[in-house]
Image: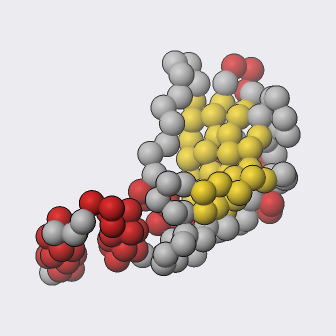
Amino acid sequence: MKITKIILTITIIFSAISCQKKEKKNNNELLLLKLITTTKGHKSVLYIERGAAFSYNGYCLDNFSPQTGNITADDYYLAHQFPVPELGILQKNALSKKSCKDLGFSGNATIKEPNGIVFDKYTCGPQGSHCNAKAIKEVGFE
């Protein structure tokens, strides 16, 4: 019953969206995303790659604040395409109930995507701030 209700809601929304002007597409996508996802209280999105000799490289995203609506880390994670790693590199991505700072990240840049979503991005890797053991464990590398 619940799945039928969700499918019906999505069908109605897609029908309404297809009738809208093209320039309003990004706002409609954000609305649709918000309607079909449920917030689980996560604060950040993690992406970490493990290369040769257990070197780690990655990023953490938090403080999501779109110009229209309220997009959460959960919403962003469900809609985002993560990079495909090079051959021989393992990668993991995850949601965390901790902020990027709580996971040991420091120094951030505020990013604004073309669809209006704004968030803080923290990076780690051999060329800069090393990935903290907290973040490595949180994403699932032991």
The answer to whether 2 is drawn above or below residue 45 in the figure is below
Nearer to the camera, 35 or 30: 30
The answer to whether 70 is drawn above or below residue 64 in the figure is below
Nearer to the camera, 6 or 33: 33
What residue is rendered at 67% in x and 24% in y?
51
Nearer to the camera, 82 or 141: 82
The answer to whether 68 is drawn above or below residue 100 in the figure is below
Residue 101 appears in the picture as rendered: yes
Q: How far across and how far down the image is residue 59, in percent?
A: 68, 45
Q: How far across and how far down the image is residue 36, in percent?
A: 33, 72
Instruction: Describe residue 113's horizontal placement relative to residue 111 as left or right.
Output: left
**Which quadrant of the view contains residue 118?**
bottom right
Instruction: Describe residue 134's horizontal placement relative to residue 74 as left or right.
Output: right
What residue is rendered at 58% in x and 24% in y?
89
Q: How far across and how far down the image is residue 81, in percent?
A: 44, 45
Instruction: Describe residue 112's horizontal placement relative to residue 20 as left or right.
Output: right
Q: How far across and how far down the image is residue 65, in percent?
A: 60, 71
Q: Which of the image's four quarters has the N terminus?
A: bottom left
Residue 37 appears in the picture as rendered: no
